[in-house]
């Protein structure tokens, strides 16, 4: 992390400060990092509530691990991952849509 040694005093209204702090908190950043990122044009995307998608990805990962374990033990020889692949593609598409939506909402 770089060391910031120059201070730039700015004036904002109470409402603007609240908005800045709210957005910084939502982005998981402190006020300075958030303002610097905005000022230098870095894209900040915040995606709310990924819990259902992350749970689905964990389930898929668990299933793949179990299949791999069974294959290594010689209990299965051939498996079809077409359904798993389809669910994974749907999950990634949902993530892409959330990322696009988050980026659009953030720019307002």
Image (tube, rainbow, N blue to C red):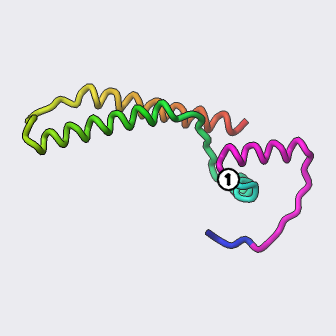
Which residue corresponds to the image point at 10% horizontal and 35% vertical from the top-left? Answer: 76
Helix, strand or loop under label 1: loop
Tell me if residue 3 comes above or below residue 69 in the rendering.
below
Instruction: Judge left or right: residue 53 versus residue 63.
Output: right
Query: Is residue 83 one of those drawn in magenta?
Result: no
The image shows residue 40 at horizontal and vertical percentages of 69, 57
Label 1 sits on residue? 29
Placement of the N terminus among the 4 image quadrants: bottom right
The image shows residue 54 at horizontal and vertical percentages of 45, 36
* Mark 1 crowd level (few <14, some 14–19, many ≥20, 10 Å Cα): some
Instruction: Judge left or right: residue 55 versus residue 82.
Output: right
- Quadrant in the picture for residue 67: top left
Front residue of this view, candidates 6 and 57: 57
Tell me if residue 30 comes above or below residue 96 in the rendering.
below
Which residue corresponds to the image point at 73% horizontal and 35% vertical from the top-left? Answer: 108
Which residue corresponds to the image point at 38% horizontal and 37% vertical from the top-left? Answer: 58
Query: Is residue 9 one of those drawn in magenta?
Result: yes
Number of numbered markers: 1
The image shows residue 44 at horizontal and vertical percentages of 63, 47
Which residue corresponds to the image point at 76% horizontal and 74% vertical from the top-left? Answer: 5
- Quadrant in the picture for residue 56: top left
Query: Which region is colored magenta?
Result: 5-28
Tell me if residue 3 comes above or below residue 54 in the rendering.
below
Instruction: Judge left or right: residue 65 versus residue 95.
Output: left
């Amino acid at each position: 992390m770089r060391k910031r040694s120059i201070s730039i005093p700015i004036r904002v209204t109470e409402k603007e400060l609240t908005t800045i702090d709210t957005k910084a908190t939502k982005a998981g950043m402190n006020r300075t990092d958030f303002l610097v990122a905005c000022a230098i044009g870095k894209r900040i995307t915040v995606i709310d509530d990924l819990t259902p998608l992350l749970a689905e990805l964990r389930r898929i990962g668990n299933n793949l691990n179990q299949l791999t374990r069974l294959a290594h033990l010689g209990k299965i020889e051939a498996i079809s991952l077409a359904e798993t692949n389809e669910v994974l593609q749907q999950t990634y598409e949902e993530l892409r849509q959330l990322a696009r939506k988050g980026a659009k909402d953030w720019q307002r």
